[in-house]
């Protein structure tokens, strides 16, 4: 399914080599990733220069959407991805080395009658393929932001991007670690 292209924005490039089906990356030395509920792609909202875009739905399964160089996909997650005290807020599962840009659709304004949203770059996490809802972005998001439910991934490389899944992390049930 092809939709009109979104305006090009400067994207933070990722260089990732993620094993197929890797759901829980190894934490960096001395760090522990907190166990959190996993959130998967529920629907492909739009795709441009992508083959088999629905292969990105759900858990990593070794089947791939193929995004051509310069192509992109906008993905709707099952629930919002939330920031945490852990080292990653999500994981992009690809096959082989990858060069991609990743953005989230953040609440950017406080008007209750007409909330403003904007695409903001997500930053590389601490594990291969990991990403963070950066503190830089969150500084521009009003307190109590509902997280990020739309993710946009763009192939910034010169080779096709083989995308298996995007996995976000939610919040564990129970009291918040931050009061």
Image (cartoon, rainbow, N blue to C red):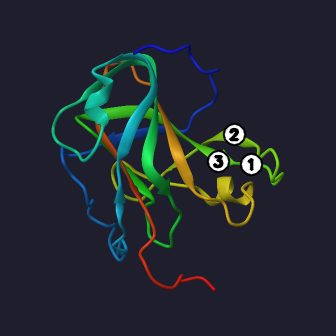
User: Are the residues at dot 1 and dot 3 in contact (C-beta closer than 8 Å)?
Assistant: yes
Image position of 99 (left or right of 63): right
Image position of 97 (left or right of 106): left
User: Are the residues at dot 3 and dot 2 in contact (C-beta closer than 8 Å)?
Assistant: yes
Q: Quadrant of residue 6?
A: top right
- The label shown at residue 118 is 2
Can you see residue 3? Answer: yes
Which x, y percent locates residue 110?
81, 54
Which x, y percent locates residue 109?
79, 50
Split into 4 quadrants, where in the image is the C terminus?
bottom right
Q: Is residue 58 above or below residue 74?
A: below
Residue denoted by label 3:
106
User: Are the residues at dot 2 and dot 1 in contact (C-beta closer than 8 Å)?
Assistant: yes
Assess disc 3: are there few (<14), some (14-19) or many (≥20) residues with their C-alpha within 10 Å of its C-alpha. many
Q: Is residue 54 above or below residue 77?
A: above
- The label shown at residue 143 is none
Q: Quadrant of residue 142?
A: bottom right
Residue denoted by label 1:
108
Q: CA distance from mark 3 to mark 2?
A: 5 Å
Q: Secondary structure at mark 3?
A: strand
The residue that appears at 24% across and 47% down in the rendered structure is 59
The residue that appears at 66% across and 53% down in the rendered structure is 137
Q: CA distance from mark 1 to mark 3?
A: 6 Å
The residue that appears at 59% across and 56% down in the rendered structure is 134
Assess disc 1: are there few (<14), some (14-19) or many (≥20) residues with their C-alpha within 10 Å of its C-alpha. some
Q: CA distance from mark 2 to mark 1?
A: 6 Å
Q: Return the residue nearer the eye: 10 or 165.
A: 165
Q: Secondary structure at mark 1?
A: loop
Q: Secondary structure at mark 2?
A: strand
Which x, y percent locates residue 16?
34, 42
Q: Residue furthest front?
A: 113
**Disc nearer the start of the sequence (3/2):** 3
């Amino acid at each position: 399914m092809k939709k009109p292209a979104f305006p090009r924005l400067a994207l933070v490039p990722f260089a990732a080599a993620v094993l197929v089906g890797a759901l829980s990356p190894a934490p960096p030395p001395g760090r522990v990733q907190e166990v959190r509920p996993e959130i998967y792609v529920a629907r492909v909202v739009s795709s441009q220069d992508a083959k088999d875009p629905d292969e990105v739905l759900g858990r990593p399964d070794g089947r791939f959407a193929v995004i051509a160089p310069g192509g992109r996909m906008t993905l709707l997650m099952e629930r919002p991805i939330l920031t945490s005290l852990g080292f990653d807020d999500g994981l992009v599962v690809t096959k082989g080395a990858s060069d991609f840009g990743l953005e989230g659709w953040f609440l950017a304004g406080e008007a209750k009658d007409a909330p403003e949203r904007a695409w903001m770059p997500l930053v590389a996490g601490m594990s291969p393929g990991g990403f963070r809802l950066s503190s830089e972005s969150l500084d521009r998001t009003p307190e109590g932001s509902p997280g990020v439910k739309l993710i946009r991934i763009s192939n910034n490389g010169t080779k096709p991007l083989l995308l298996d899944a995007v996995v976000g992390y939610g919040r564990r049930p129970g009291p918040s670690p931050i009061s």
